[in-house]
């Protein structure tokens, strides 16, 4: 398993954890959808080609923003941990897509 695939799996599991544990599920739903699409792309089950938007930037940005909002709203330890992981994975992927880390 490559690092990118592992990060996608971590984001997916963490966002599902947020979805199951939080009362306000709108932000967690955005994270689940974004990480789910990333997982489908990473495992080759789906392909997207959108000319106007860079999907490699949009999905990590959605993860980072939704994770940060979920982190700010969370109070339980496991929800804070899951939100932190979603935010960190989204931020790492976003920085990689923008070639800041290369």
Image: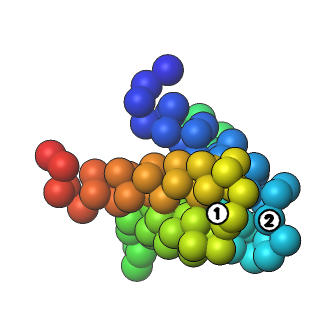
Say how the picture is coloured: rainbow
Whether residue 38 sits left or right of residue 55 in the image: it is right
Q: Residue at x 40, y 79 (%)?
A: 52
Q: How many marks?
A: 2
Q: Which residue is mark 1?
A: 31
Whether residue 80 sits left or right of residue 100 in the image: it is right
Whether residue 4 sits left or right of residue 76 in the image: it is left
Q: Residue at x 45, y 50 (%)?
A: 89
x, y percentage for residue 74?
Answer: 67, 66
Q: Is residue 61 visible?
A: yes
x, y percentage for residue 56?
Answer: 41, 59
Q: Residue at x 69, y 48 (%)?
A: 78
User: Which mark is first along the chain, 1 or 2?
Assistant: 2
Whether residue 2 sits left or right of residue 14 in the image: it is left
> From the viewer's perspective, is residue 32 above or below residue 10?
below
> From the viewer's perspective, is residue 74 above or below residue 43?
below
Q: How many angstroms separate mark 2 from mark 1 (CA)?
A: 12 Å
Q: Tell me which corner region of the image, top left, top right, bottom left or bottom right, holds residue 79.
A: bottom right
x, y percentage for residue 68?
Answer: 51, 69
Secondary-structure class at tag 1: helix
Q: Nearer the viewer, residue 2 or 11?
A: 11
Q: Tell me which corner region of the image, top left, top right, bottom left or bottom right, holds residue 61.
A: bottom left
Q: Which residue is mark 2?
A: 22
């Amino acid at each position: 398993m490559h690092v990118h695939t592992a990060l996608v799996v971590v984001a997916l599991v963490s966002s599902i954890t947020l979805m199951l544990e939080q009362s306000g599920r709108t932000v967690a739903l955005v994270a689940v959808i974004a990480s789910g699409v990333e997982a489908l792309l990473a495992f080759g089950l789906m392909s997207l080609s959108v000319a106007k938007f860079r999907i490699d930037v949009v999905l990590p940005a959605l993860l980072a923003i939704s994770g940060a909002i979920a982190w700010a709203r969370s109070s339980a330890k496991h929800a804070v941990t899951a939100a932190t992981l979603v935010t960190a994975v989204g931020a790492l992927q976003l920085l990689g897509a923008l070639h800041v880390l290369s």
